[in-house]
Amino acid sequence: MGLFLISETGPTFLMMGIPGLEALHHWISIPFCALYLIALLGNCMILFIIKKTQSLHEPMYYFLSMLSVTDLGLVLCTLPTTLGIFWFNMRRIGFDACLTQMYFIHILSFIESSVLLAMAFDRFIAISHPLRHPSILTKTTVIKIGLAIIMRGMVSLLPIPFLLKRLTFCGKTELSHSFCFHPDIMNLACADIKVNVFYGMIILLSTVGMDFIFIVLSYILIIKTVISLATKEECLKALNTCVSHICAVLVFFIPMIGLSMIHRFGKNIPPLDLAPLVHITMGNIYILVPAVLNPIIYGVRTKEIQRRILNLIHIYNNRISQ
């Protein structure tokens, strides 16, 4: 377990299933399959409804579409390796394949963080400057913001695979998750990783960290605007438009912060024999929970999306009954 493996292109890592429950992996795969299916169907349905509903062709829902695409990307990045472990005990992954998966997971996470910031900006403009909202966030502006978000993620993370490639790996090569994660790979190196740690911390703070700070600042300004509104009904109506976004922010940032803390301090928290289980649990929450809950949050909270979903179910039931 955890011995150093060599392939023609470099080290081969061993991914982690559920430690201690390997004999039950086939049964454990059932809830994982259900979660993956819910995430895939939910986000695809959100995209389909937004595309087909003309009244939803506005900035808030364009950003929601970006969020759904990002969640789909994260799910599709990890689904093959996770289910491969549970169904076929395929734990090995080559170095280059691992770096590729890691790169896309981190890019999509950074993109999701930036999209949540863009959604906060949209809510601030809609509440603080409602008359100027259509002229500020035009379709062209939203496209530019989307492209800037993608470029920011790709460029900021581009050095990470090259910084890992320069490292040598010896001894233990067992990962803590069913997917490849930068801190996880980095900590397996038998070389000086100070540059990797420094660059990773700088990028994390300057992207996700700054996004979170600006989201908080946006809501401080929103609350300041809401307080100045004339009636209690207007205040509640304005805040009600932010509930879905606040839930999406919490669902994304809490697991991300939790996973970061686990990788930095988790190995020192007793009982030590539970550390692998905590790592794999937090990793799966980080990947799956936002992708599963975001469509549910927006489906429940957005009347137009809710109405369209009910109409689709009604049409489907009528076709079956015929």
Image (cartoon, helix red, strand yellow):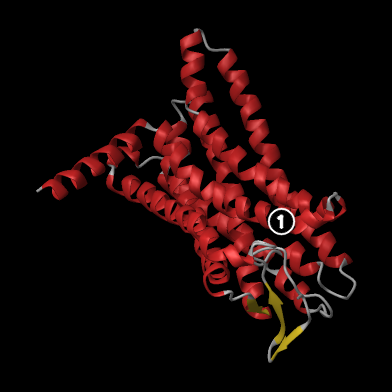
* Residue 59 in view in this figure: no
Q: Which residue is drawn at 57% across and 33% down?
A: 246
| Quadrant in the rendering for residue 217 | top right
The local secondary structure at tag 1 comes to helix
Residue 305: percent from the left, percent from the top?
Answer: 34, 38
Q: Is residue 213 above or below residue 7?
A: above
Residue furthest out toward the front: 23
In the picture of the structure, the residue carrying the numbered disc 1 is 277
Residue 74: percent from the left, percent from the top?
Answer: 54, 59
Q: Which residue is drawn at 76% across and 62% down?
A: 183
Left or right of 121 on screen, residue 140: left
Q: In this view, does 8 lie above or below 135?
A: below
Left or right of 44 on screen, residue 166: right
- Category of crowding for the residue at label 1, using alpha-carbon neighbours closer than 10 angstroms: few (below 14), some (14–19), many (at least 20): some
Number of numbered discs overlaid on the protein picture: 1
| Quadrant in the rendering for residue 203 | bottom right
Residue 243: percent from the left, percent from the top?
Answer: 52, 29
Q: Residue at x 32, y 46 (%)?
A: 49
Residue furthest out toward the top: 231
Q: Nearer the viewer, residue 322 or 260?
A: 322
Q: Is residue 261 above or below residue 2?
A: above
Q: Quadrant of the N terminus?
A: bottom right
Residue 188: percent from the left, percent from the top?
Answer: 81, 71
Q: Nearer the viewer, residue 265 or 61?
A: 265
Q: Which of 290 and 62 is in front in this view?
A: 290
Q: Which amino acid does label 1 sit on?
A: Leu
* Residue 267 in view in this figure: yes
Q: Nearer the viewer, residue 222 or 82?
A: 82
Left or right of 284 on screen, residue 67: left
Residue furthest out toward the left: 322
